[in-house]
Image (cartoon, rainbow, N blue to C red):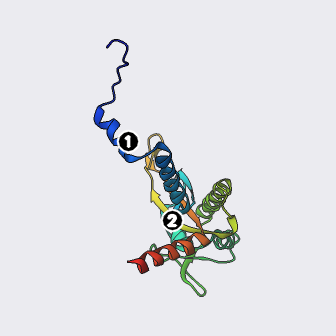
Amino acid sequence: MENTPKTNVPKAAVKTAVKAGSPAKTENRIENKTENKAENVILTAKARAMNLPVSAKHCIELSRNLRYKTTVEAKKILEGVLSYKKALPFYRFVHNIGHRQGIGSGRYPQKATKEFMHLVKAVEANAQAKGMNITNLKIIKILANRAATPQTGNRHRRGTKRTHLEIEVREKKAFKTERKVREQKNTKK
């Protein structure tokens, strides 16, 4: 009796392992699952900018105009605003804003546009680092939130502007493949 080795594995676990099959079969199942997951993964790239000293209202209007556009189109819009060639149309925050030719109320928000330009370039660099094609990137998520307003000034305390920005992009061809997969699932049902 002393020569037999003691194991902490219960007898029921040994029986189920024998019934399930050889270890090679389980390894094959695991590999197939990971291959399927790798095919379904859609690469996205993100970039964030926190506590920027820019107007949240301007950033909200900019994000509304850039959403669902490609990064190339977004850069053209931003460059047009920076060079005062094309005004950015304002839809929500329009009180006391002058009208521009052909678009209604609009402005040229310089500080916010510069920050968005940095953010678009950063997300393109992140996408390139992940191996994505930067000419086919589409903005799928872009948002601006108000950040905490720190009080500045010694005796005359006043709040300063702070904004959080976030952007997420995906390759265009990923949308087509995703749509095809959805259609195939619907036809199978």
- Residue position for label 1: 18
Q: Position of residue 14 (x, y in %)?
A: 34, 36
* Camera-side residue of 135 and 31: 31
User: Could you say whether the residue bearing mark 1 is in a helix, strand or loop?
Assistant: helix
179 lies left or right of 116? left
Q: Position of residue 20 (x, y in %)?
A: 38, 47
* Camera-side residue of 116 and 38: 38
- Residue position for label 2: 141
Let me know if residue 50 appears in the view: yes
Indicate which label's residue lies in the foreground, 2 or 1: 1
Which amino acid type is shown beneath numbered disc 1? Val
The residue located at (68%, 64%) in the rendering is 134
Q: Looking at the image, is mark 2 or mark 1 earlier in the sequence?
A: 1
The residue located at (54%, 61%) in the rendering is 167
Let me know if residue 94 appears in the view: no
Crowd rating for badge 1 (residues with CA inside 10 Å; few <14, some 14–19, many 20+): few
Numbered mark located on residue 131 in the image: none
Q: Position of residue 52 (x, y in %)?
A: 54, 52
* Camera-side residue of 127 and 104: 127
The residue located at (56%, 75%) in the rendering is 176
Which amino acid type is shown beneath numbered disc 2? Lys
Res 17 → quadrant: top left
Res 45 → quadrant: bottom right
